[in-house]
Amino acid sequence: MAVGIAALVLAPSALALACPNIPLDERLSDADIAFVGRVTAERATANGRSYQFVVDQTVKGPVGREIDVDSATRLVDATDKPIVHDEALGVLASLDGARVVTESCLLSDPGTLLSVSDEPKGNAIRLVIGILILLAVLAYSIHRLRHRRRDLATRSSLRR
């Protein structure tokens, strides 16, 4: 009876993919290659499986329009189901000589991968525009203060 209950309790976790809890930005910095792409072909090899991807967007590394990625085991999603062909997928991989190698734990949602990889753009121009506005406000304020002092000096000399 106890074995049956233990099997039922442990069964869902045994079916799910068990990956280390490492933030995606750290996994991206450790990866040699990262891209968003779609699987177009899959075949068994002597070392496991090879997947052919059409690359939608390169995130990191030397990636062409099409790339072959090897895996020691069949690639699966977080629920342990085989990945779907022709569906966008974020892929992190490493280089093993000339081979590109990945594993299921290095797959991610494409939107999440792109959001982590995108550095905020335009910060430098925003800073320059902010400084220009600040300088314009300061110049106008100094101009008004000088005008005001001159007007006060003129009024005080007229009162005498």
Image: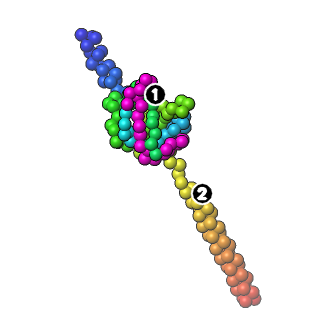
Residue 82 appears in which quarter of the rendering?
top left
Residue 96 coordinates in the image, percent (x, y): 54, 30
Instruction: Identify the magenta region.
Output: 43-64
Q: Residue at x 53, y 49 (%)?
A: 119
The foreground one among 89 and 153 is: 89
Image quarter (top left, top right, bottom left or bottom right) of the N terminus: top left
Percent across and percent down for residue 83 are 35, 34
- Horizontal arrangement in the rendering, residue 68 relative to residue 159 (left or right): left
Magenta: main secondary structure: strand
Give coordinates of residue 151: x percent, y percent. 69, 83
Q: Is residue 44 magenta?
A: yes
> Closer to the N terminus: mark 1 or mark 2?
1
Residue matched to label 1: 20
Location of residue 107 by image quarter? top left
Element under disc 1: loop
Asked if the stretch drawn in magenta spans residue 153, the answer is no
- Above or below residue 94? Residue 127 is below
Q: Are marks 1 and 2 in contact (CB under 8 Å)?
A: no
Please identify the quadrant where the C terminus is shown: bottom right
Q: Residue at x 32, y 30 (%)?
A: 81
| 23 versus 45 height, above or below | below
* Residue at 32%, 24% in the rendered image: 15
Task: Point out residue 28 in the picture as x, y percentages from the top left corner.
Answer: 51, 38
Disc 2 marks a residue whose amino acid type is: Ala
Location of residue 6 (image quadrant): top left
Kind of residue indicated by mark 1: Pro
Q: Which residue is mark 2?
A: 124
Q: Where 104 sits versus 126, above or below?
A: above
